[in-house]
Amino acid sequence: MQDLMKIVCRTTFTTTLILISSLQSLVAAEITFSKTKLLINSHIYSLEIAKTQDQRQHGLMFRKKLASKNGMVFVYPNSNIHYIWMKNTKIKLTVIWINKGGEVVDIKRLNPCLQNPCKVFGLNYPSKYIIELNHQPHDIKIGDQIRGLDQL
């Protein structure tokens, strides 16, 4: 009887894991992003645009790689204190906070979150945009101006 219970428990657990994995894939497949190109310090970056709450919440979750000069720009309706986390993000990222005037106000290099709870990252002052890029070095520094964000 104990052996039967172990088999039932193992089967139920395995089925639950498969179901959760399938649901995560479905959610990821349903969220789509438009794309833009931004010129930042003489480099062209190809960025997906996260403008809606669902898009911003999903971000770069579940991505296994991100090519050089590619990433995502998060566009918020208002300049405010905006936070991000690395939940379900499988790659290291360079995260850039930008104010409503297009000025880079902070840059952080973040690692994937491997255990819950995931740490939340933000600033003590407002931003309107956040750009996430792959973790390699970029020619972007605090004080740089990024043009074209207000057109997104």
Image (cartoon, grey):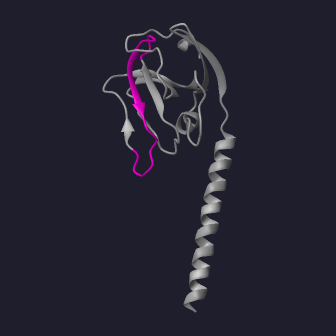
Instruction: Tell me the chief SS of the magenta region.
Output: loop
Quadrant housing residue 64:
top right
Is residue 7 or residue 25 the one in the foreground? 7
Is residue 18 or residue 93 the one in the foreground? 93
Return the x and y of residue 94 as percentages of the image width and height.
46, 27
Report the residue at 61% width, 87% height from top. 4
Return the x and y of residue 29 as percentages of the image width and height.
69, 42
Outermost residue toward the front in this view? 136
Quadrant housing residue 22:
bottom right
Report the residue at 69% width, 41% height from top. 30
> Which quarter shows the C terminus?
top right
Residue 132 against residue 65 in the figure, above or below:
above
In-image side of 147 versus 27 (left or right): left
> Which quarter shows the N terminus?
bottom right
Is residue 2 or residue 29 the one in the foreground? 2
Residue 103 against residue 61 in the figure, above or below:
above
Q: Is residue 138 magenta?
A: no
Outermost residue toward the left in this view? 124
Q: Total label count?
A: 0
In-image side of 27 versus 124 (left or right): right
Q: Is residue 114 magenta?
A: yes
In-image side of 141 versus 4 (left or right): left
Return the x and y of residue 110 as percentages of the image width and height.
42, 34
Magenta stretch? 99-118
In-image side of 4 versus 136 (left or right): right
